[in-house]
Amino acid sequence: MLGAVNDWLIGQSVHELLVTALCIRIDVPTGMAEIASAGHLGPFVKRWTGGAEAVTPAPALPLGILTGETYSQISTVLSLQDALVLATDGITDRLATADDPLGERGLIEHLGAAPPSARHICDALLALGADTEQDATVVVVQMPARARRSTPVR
């Protein structure tokens, strides 16, 4: 999908347009999340049982730069009530340090300390970007509390 969008953007008459993006497919019954990145910071996982971690896709160019670019995917497994968290640099830049220029470790620390609900995660992270001039966007997708059947019940 990212490759098709990339080639379409390049075919438009808008020059010097580039877009970072993530493409994520989650199979809810199994918890399998497949992730591809086009120059965007990878997602993070807030575990319901505690703690957080980064999911680091293979480096790739943003969309709109090079025709025929391919985008590799990686996968991770989400357990019940785990949350997949995406944030823009308006959030992570506030956490950047000399040792952590992208702010990833700072974000993991904040996620680890946040209560494990989508609302609390959003509130905690958006508060970090409240006084920045950059965009401050957070997307949280939380797995359901109960397992769902992957086949219909008869």
Image: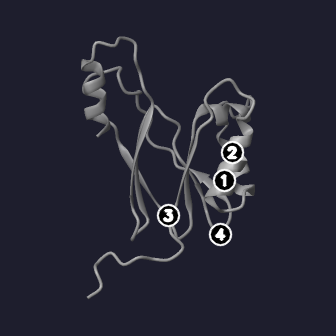
Q: Amino acid at mark 4?
A: Thr
Q: Residues within 10 Å of mark 3 (few under 14, many from 20)?
A: many
Q: Earlier in the sequence, mark 4 or mark 1?
A: 4
Q: CA distance from mark 1 to mark 3?
A: 16 Å
Q: Position of residue 1 (x, y in %)?
A: 28, 40
Q: Which residue occupies the foreground of this view, 49 or 141?
A: 141
- Which mark is in front, 1 or 3? 1
Which residue is labeled 2 in the image? 125
- Name the residue rendered at 72%, 56% in the picture: 114
Left/right of residue 108 with respect to residue 1 in the rendered view: right
Q: Amino acid at mark 3?
A: Leu
Which residue is labeled 3 in the image? 78
Q: Amino acid at mark 1?
A: Ile
Q: CA distance from mark 3 to mark 2?
A: 20 Å
Q: Which residue occupies the foreground of this view, 131 or 147?
A: 131
Which residue is labeled 1 in the image? 121
Q: Is residue 50 placed above or below 12 in the rendered structure?
A: below
Q: Secondary structure at mark 1?
A: helix
